[in-house]
Amino acid sequence: MIRRLAWMWKASLALTAISTAAWGQSASPTPAGPKIYSCVTADGRRLTSDRPIPECQGREQTLHRSDGTVRAKVAPAKSPEEKAADEVLQRELLAKKAALDDAIRHDRNLMARFKNRAAHDLARAAALDDLDAATGVTQRRLASLAKERKGLDDEAEFYKKKTLPPKLKQALDANDAATEAQKLFLEQQSAERGRVNRRYDLELTRLQKLWAGAPPGSLGPPPSAHESEPPPSAASVSGARR
């Protein structure tokens, strides 16, 4: 009984091996037949070759199987101008894809940072608080310089028709320079406040559409730094004209 079972097991293995080999042979790819190209030249000649036909480089060629049936159509080779145009188009497509990827990434990051309007308002307030603190420092410095200037002017009254002492003149010049610097800081801080508000306004407009269900990247490119600039005030335009 044991010998019979052993024999049956070996026979089963042999049949499995034969079946596997037969399947492998039937599944192996059939070697590709020879390639046959044909075309009609510009002057009407029909040419045939086992490789692409140089005389028909600018014309469509037909690739046949060994039995003569059509396997594929081979498009004409492109001219240098056509290749250059394709390269330009490819660069444009790549640039558009990169811009879309950037917009998608920007929108996803924006939505991850701000889940709702309250979170965005809080971030705006924090950014403005920092600017307000810096502006307060500048204003206090200007007040201190103005007080210092009054004392220097009072002292200079004694020298109306005389040459100012070098030390006093140096102090007046230093006060002027420091005051101008602080005024410039104040202007920059005011401009920065406008930029911050403008940036948060643009973000909020975009976020409201995203919160409403607009897919990330569907709203066009993110606002640039230039778009975040506040419009020039009438005073700055007037100063520029002067």
Image (cartoon, rainbow, N blue to C red):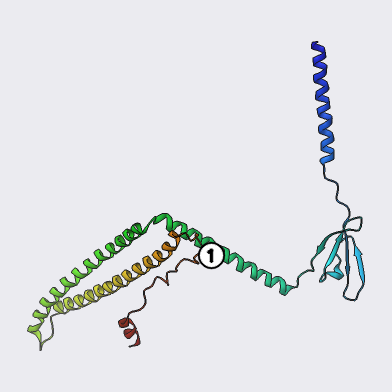
Q: Observer-nearest residue: 174 or 113? A: 113
Where is mark 1, residue-wise?
99
Q: Position of residue 149 (x, y in %)?
A: 14, 76
The quadrant in which residue 177 appears is bottom left
Mark 1: few/some/many CA within 10 Å (<14, 14-19, 20+):
some
Q: Residue 116 vs residue 179: left or right?
A: right
Residue under the image location 64 percent in, 71 percent down: 88
What type is the residue that disc 1 sits on? Answer: Ala
Name the residue at the left extreme. 158
| Quarter of the N terminus within the rendering | top right
Q: Observer-nearest residue: 60 or 213? A: 213
The quadrant in which residue 59 appears is bottom right
Q: Relative to 159, is 75 above or below?
A: above
Name the residue at the top extreme. 1
Q: Residue 217 vs residue 137: left or right?
A: right
- Local SS, label 1: helix
Q: Position of residue 127 (x, y in %)?
A: 31, 62
Residue under the image location 24 percent in, 68 percent down: 135
Name the residue at the front extreme. 212
Q: Residue 195 vs residue 156: left or right?
A: right
Q: Position of residue 101 (x, y in %)?
A: 53, 60
The quadrant in which residue 231 appears is bottom left
| Quarter of the C terminus within the rendering | bottom left
Q: Observer-nearest residue: 111 or 93? A: 111
Q: Position of residue 233 (x, y in %)?
A: 32, 79
Instruction: Give the mark count.
Output: 1
Residue under the image location 84 percent in, 66 percent down: 61
